[in-house]
Image (cartoon, rainbow, N blue to C red):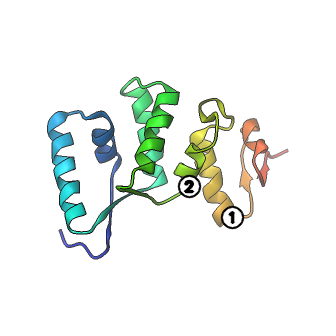
Amino acid sequence: MNISSNLVGLDTSIVLRLLVGEPASQFKRAVVRLDEFRAAGVQAAVSDLVIAEAYFALQYHYDVPKQVALDTLKQFLESSEIVPLGVALRILQQPNMAKAEPGFVDRIIHAEYERKTQAMLTFEKAATRLANVEIPK
């Protein structure tokens, strides 16, 4: 693999192996490869989409309670070995995210639209608690 920058993006499958340690053989291979990257001065980067996928996978495939999934992802993104590429960490640092409405992933969506558009259109009533959100009348 030819690396032209100091970042390598981690896919959801890698993030999940790092978080749950299963299957053990893939976990070990991921850790070894990340150690090789680190030795070469390359950092691991994670997108908001990967964090959103991991959030749902932890809950639905690994039976991790919502609050534990959020706390786990927050710790992961706060690690000095991970470079968060989006807003997920900022959102995870907000209090009571497990009970927040709109929820974690909806807030990621909203944050991206806030950066790139003038407003967000939705039928989700809870989303109207956020800035520049409209429900069609």
Q: Quadrant of the N terminus?
A: bottom left
Q: In the image, is 112 to the left or to the right of 9?
A: right
Q: Contact (CB < 8 A) between labels 2 and 1?
A: no
On the image, the x and y values in percent for residue 106 come to 62, 43
Q: Nearer the viewer, mark 2 or mark 1?
A: 2
> Residue at the spot x=78%, y=42% of the render?
129
N-terminal of the two: label 2 or label 1?
A: 2
Number of residues whose C-alpha sits closer than 10 Å to that of mark 2, classed few (under 14), some (14–19) or many (20 or more): some
User: Left or right of 9: which side holds 1?
Assistant: left
The quadrant of the rendering that contains the C terminus is top right
So how many labels did they put on this image?
Answer: 2
Instruction: Name the residue at 63% across, 43% down.
Output: 94
Give the number of the disc on residue 117: 1
Q: In this image, 68 relative to 82: left or right?
A: right
- Local packing at callout 1 (Cα closer than 10 Å; few below 14, some 14-19, many 20+) is few
Q: Residue furthest front?
A: 80
Q: Residue at x 30, y 44 (%)?
A: 13
Where's residue 46, x and y in %?
A: 40, 55
Q: Which residue is mark 2?
A: 87
* Three-letter residue code for mark 2: Val
* Residue 61 horizontal side relative to residue 27, left or right: right
Q: Secondary structure at mark 1?
A: loop
> Helix or strand or loop: what does disc 2 sit on?
loop
Residue at image location 75% in from the left, 47% down from the top:
130
Where residue 96 sits in the image (x, y, percent)?
64, 33
| The furthest residue to the bottom | 4
**Disc number for residue 106:** none
Height in image: 76 above or below 86?
above
Which three-letter amino acid code belongs to the residue tagged 1? Answer: Thr
| Residue farthest to the right, as pictured | 137
Residue 117's place in the image compared with 11, above or below, is: below
Q: CA distance from mark 2 to mark 1?
A: 16 Å
